[in-house]
Image (cartoon, grey):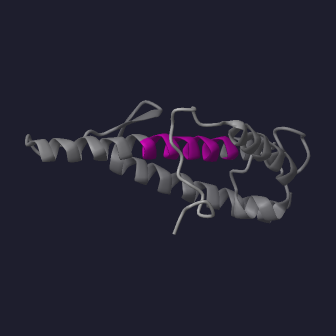
Amino acid sequence: MEKETLKKIKKKLEAEKTRIEEELGNIAKKKGKKFTPVYPEYGSRDEENAAEVEEYEIHLALDKNLEKLLGNVIKSLAKIEQGTYGKCENCGLEISKERLEAFPSANFCITCQSKKDNLITKFFSRLRPHKNVRQPKDKKTRRQ
């Protein structure tokens, strides 16, 4: 990969790392390398307690997703330093410049990522609801 392109991508990754860390700082406290979501305190009334729990659940989900994104960004920055950035973790081929410019923390080439996504889609498409769970009627079968 060209040095100039790599510099641009590294700058983009560093900016993304800073942004994610700031966002995590708004919902969690850093303990070592991990972040722990902050439990909000609104008061002691039932409504306030319900709001606290709801917001904490949101913080948990955000924390998990942001930490995963941060991990991928840090991993990509380390790969740049090691000189291995831009190689697919599955097949070892070069990831396209366009993909890396659009998604700098990509770990897989388009082909391998598509195969991975298709496996996940196939798995979930095979799942069927339990026989006792009522499903919404299809619009075609509903009576008007």
- Quick one: 34 or 79, which is closer to the camera? 34
Q: Is residue 75 above or below residue 33?
A: below
Q: Position of residue 86 (x, y in %)?
A: 81, 50
Q: Is residue 22 left or right of residue 113?
A: left
In this orientation, which residue lies closer to the viewer: 20 or 131?
A: 131
Q: Is residue 136 visible?
A: yes
Q: Give the percent coordinates (x, y) of residue 36.
A: 37, 35
**From which residue to which does the magenta span run?**
61-76
- Coordinates of residue 103 in the picture (x, y in percent): 70, 58
The residue lying at 48 percent from left, 57 percent from top is 19
Left or right: residue 120 versus residue 36 is right
Q: Is residue 3 left or right of residue 53?
A: right
Percent from the top left, x then y, of residue 45?
Answer: 8, 43
> Which residue shows up at 29% across the image and 45% down it?
54
Q: Is 74 part of what is drawn in magenta?
A: yes
In magenta stretch: residue 127: no
Which corner quadrant of the image does residue 141 belong to? bottom right
Q: Main secondary structure of the magenta part?
A: helix
